[in-house]
Amino acid sequence: EGKSAGRNAIRFFNPDMQHKVEQRASMETALSRALEQREFELYYQPQIDREGGLLGAEVLLRWIPEPGKPVSPAEFIPLAEDTGLIVPLGYWVLETACLQLRAWQQQCPERGFSLAVNISARQFHQHDFIRRLQEIIERSGADPCGLKLELTESVVLDDIAGVIEKIDGLRRLGLGFSMDDFGTGYSSLSYLKRLPLDQLKIDTSFVRDLAHSANDLAIVRAIIAMGHSLNLHVIAEGVETAEQKVYLERYGCDAYQGYLFGRPMAAREFESRFIVAAARMD
Ligand code: C2E
Ligand code: MG
Ligand code: MG
Ligand code: MG
């Protein structure tokens, strides 16, 4: 009685908020079962170098609770982080990606083909992350040199020394590191200088208006120059138009990712469109 009165009171006070709370609760329940129900799938988006060659792909998670209706990671990753599901889910992503990596490495053995996997801060900070990832890699048979981890600036919000130590430990296994969404977070350049990274990823928000915004152009140019002076490979994400690519190319950007080159796609499609062609060229 009291409980339902309370609920009604909220509904009366703010029906919109009530609706959001209910929606979130039901999504949370559905998400908690999604892993065992095999509702997740990995999509792959090509990364292309300046000569138009295939470097590899970014691995992007999809939740497909009903056929044909994928839920965006932007919606469910934050929820998975709050509930802690991100940890088992993240290991599933790594396991699946490593098995795929091994298969594709075997198909184009001549290339340094790599898969880039997004790692949430919560997962990265697990105390046994290195050991578990090492086990996953060994079981998969993949060459770890083809595995790159994408971290965001939120990973380095505290304990930079610990983060450096962890990155170094993983680098010794052969893994590479990319700083994702660069320029949108809160980390400082003094952090960037200390982190043993391989790559900077220019965020979509700077690429979007590149051809029409002098400010964005200046920022992108500066990121590329700074990345190169720190000996980092620089890739731009969200490249949708030939015009954006022209500017990126002019300022020396090393690689591109975006709809211009290919949308994120299922493994089978990625394989027939990109791997088969690359293997033929070897
Ligand atoms: P992100 O790592 O920055 O990934 C890039 C996002 O940009 C992807 O969105 C991709 O589909 C989208 N994108 C790629 N090219 C273009 C383009 O040309 N134009 C536009 N407008 N968008 C483009 P998506 O797949 O929805 O993923 C969103 C975010 O969710 C990712 O951002 C990443 O932070 C997170 N995420 C995705 N998969 C995973 C995962 O396995 N683990 C974790 N922890 N996070 C993930
Ligand atoms: Mg990413
Ligand atoms: Mg990104
Ligand atoms: Mg982004």
Image: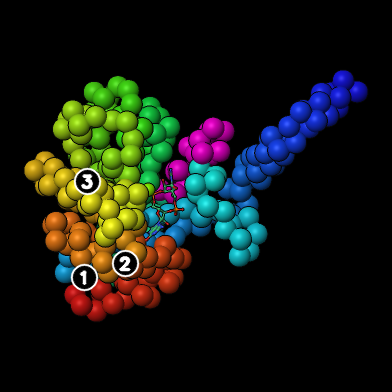
Q: Are marks 3 and 2 in contact (CB under 8 Å)?
A: no
Which residue is at the front of the view, 108 or 225?
Answer: 225
- In this view, 156 is above or below 113: above
- In this view, 71 is above or below 274: above
Could you tell me which residue is drawn at 55 percent across and 44 percent down?
A: 76
Binning the other alpha carbons within 10 Å of mark 1 as few (below 14), some (14 to 19) or many (20 upward) gives: few
For residue 137: magenta? no
Q: Amino acid at mark 1?
A: Gly
In-image side of 162 versus 268 (left or right): left
Return the mark for residue 52.
Answer: 1
C-alpha span from label 3 to label 2: 18 Å
Residue at the extreme right of the image, as rendered: 1
Could you tell me which residue is drawn at 57 percent across and 53 percent down?
A: 71
In-image side of 37 versus 211 (left or right): right
- Is residue 270 something that shows in the picture? yes
Classified by dominant secondary structure, the portion drawn in magenta counts as helix
Could you tell me which residue is drawn at 71 percent across and 38 percent down?
A: 16
Residue 235's image quarter?
bottom left
Residue at image mark 2: 241
Measured as percent of width and height from the top left, residue 168 is found at: 21, 34
Could you tell me which residue is drawn at 52 percent across and 52 percent down?
A: 72
Residue 120's image quarter?
top left
Judged from the image, the secondary structure of the residue bearing numbered disc 3 is helix
Measured as percent of width and height from the top left, residue 83 is found at: 57, 33
Q: Amino acid at mark 3?
A: Ile
